[in-house]
Structures are given as structure tokens and as C-alpha cells.
Image (cartoon, rainbow, N blue to C red):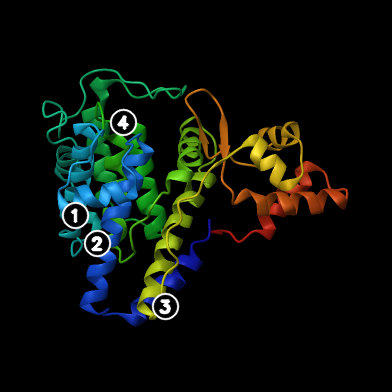
Amino acid sequence: MNFNRLTDKKQALDALRPLPDDLVRNLDDWFRVELTYTSNAIEGNTLNRRETALVVEKGITIGGKLLREHLEAVNHAQALDWIKEQVNHDPGHLVENDILHIHGVILKGIDDANAGHYRSVPVRISGSTVVLPNPATVPDLMCDFAEWLASDQELHPVEFSAEAHYRLVTIHPFTDGNGRSARILMNMILLMSGYPAAIIRKRDRLAYIRSLEKAQLGGSREDYLKIIARAVDRSLNIYLSAASGKNPKPVKEYKLLKIGELAKQVGERNSTIRHWTKQGLLDVAEVTDVGYQLYSPELVGRIRKIQALKKQRFTLREIMEKISSIEPEWSE
């Protein structure tokens, strides 16, 4: 996978450094809340963006929300504060204790008995067929992982950070908090390498989880790497816009669409949308507790392209190839 686009944007950002202190503080505060909100939302935390900000920045408790959800927000923000203190170090100096420290902060007050400790019991990922390592092998696997982190890397920094995330969640060394710890580690490596943190949006949750599972089951990691690359690209755009004096686009809370709502917007039948989803042309953003598939409104533009190509009598396989080549590699 080619990461030249990200390298070019980082170089453009480096040319604008040092950034004004007020701007840096503003960006740091925004990323602290956004990373905390999105990472916890991926794991099922129900605090919304505004509520997360109130908990993290003001220490305000939100009525009707669980104590655990408040602690998850506070802990994640504190873990981000810690990794920012490490940015002057090289990723090659990361050791096992750094990962254990991150996990200890993530689960502080939530599960103190397991916080910062490897699991001693077998675990499974809910709804997944991925087989996770036996707990007896975890210490050795983590030792090997730490050696890999410290080895000379020829990978692009974004690919290295994504690979570190992938390897950690695949070992799944903890009883809980593996995903959040892996995303914190990934962003620690990105920050150490001079890149902004990667925000995996709530609406990308299902695609992100599926891409990880696909790789863990022996498939290609391309989908996973693209999701991480898109996330870094969006963050670079935010920094470049702010550094250039432009107002970054506000973060929108998209209302996900039911299959019927999406079909109505684009003039297609539900069965057609379902078929295109099964063929891989459309991605499901989320599945509700009762099994309803929800779609991002961003797919309307993709469906318009599919419709135009179908009128030209292209097959679905040909459309898939053309869509991939038409759309920017890391489109918004």
C-alpha cells in the first residue's frame, strides 16, 4: 500500500511548524475529547460527544449514565495525557511495561484486579469466529511483540502503528480493554513519529471491526490499513487547515439510515441495496440490537456511481473495480 500521500501531507505540516501555542492547545483539547468519545463509543460506551467533553473537561457526571462509562472517559483521557508526555521518545524504545501502564490506566477503578495484568483465562470476541491465543502463551507472545516493537522497522510510520495495533488486539492479552489499549498504542507511535492521532469514527465501527476480523482469519489486511490511513489523513487535514488559518469543518453527527430510508433516497428497492451489500459494494455502518442494518448517508454518492455504471452495462464485479479506482484512495 502506498503511503506517499500521507508523507507529503506530514511534510507540508512540518513546514508550518512550530505552530502557535494557542492553536496547539486548542487542537490538543479537541483531539483529547474526540479520541476519547470515539474509542469508547466503539466499545459500546453510550456517552455522546458533548457528554464526554463535560465528563473529561469539567468533571461533571451525566444523569442516567453508568459509573463505568464515566470512568472509561476519564481514564482514556488520562491515558492520552500520558502518551503525550512520551512523544519525544522513539517508538523503538517502547517496552512491555508501557503497554501494561496504558492498560492499567484504561481499567483504573473499573477492574483494578486485572488492570495492567495479562489475562489468565481464555477469552472470545463476541460474535466472532476468531480463535484467540491460549492465556498460557500470552506472556511469551507479548515478549515477542515487545521485541518486534524495538526492532529496526522499514515500515512507513502509519503502517507500523497500524501493525502494532493489529498485533496487540490479535494477541488479546487482557481480559478487557484490548481495543482501547491497542488504539492508544497506535496513536502513541503516530505521535512519536510526528503524525497526528488517528480517530476511528463511530460510524466506521463495523467496517473497522470486520477489517480486523478479516485479517485475523487469514485474509488481506488491505481494508484494515485503508481505514487507519483514512483516519490519519483526516487528522492531517484538520491540522493543515488549522495551521493555514482556515476553519476546519465541524464534526457532524450523522444519522444512520435504515435500508428502506437509503433505498428511498436513491430510488432503489430494499432487495437491491441488500444484494449490493452482500456483494461488497456497500458497507454496513452499524447493526442494531434487533438486527437492523444501518447505513451511512455518505453511501448515497457511491450508489449514484453504481447506478451510472449499471446504465453502461458494467457487471457488479467491473463496477467494484471501477468504484475503487474512481474514489480517492482515502476519501472522506
Q: To which quarter of the image does residue 119 belong?
A: top left
The residue under label 1 is 57
Q: Residues within 10 Å of mark 4 (few under 14, many from 20)?
A: many
* Distance of label 3 from label 4 (alpha carbons): 41 Å
Q: Residues within 10 Å of mark 1 (few under 14, many from 20)?
A: some
The residue under label 4 is 172
Q: Position of residue 108 (x, y in %)?
A: 13, 36
Q: Residues within 10 Å of mark 2 (few under 14, many from 20)?
A: some
Side of 57 where 247 appears, left or right: right
Give SS at disc 2: helix
Q: To which quarter of the image does residue 155 belong?
A: bottom left
Q: Are marks 1 and 2 in contact (CB under 8 Å)?
A: yes
Vertical position of residue 66 compared to residue 244: above or below? above
Q: Position of residue 290 (x, y in %)?
A: 51, 22
Q: Residues within 10 Å of mark 3 (few under 14, many from 20)?
A: few
Regarding residue 154, the answer to whether it shows in the image is no
Q: Amino acid at mark 4?
A: His
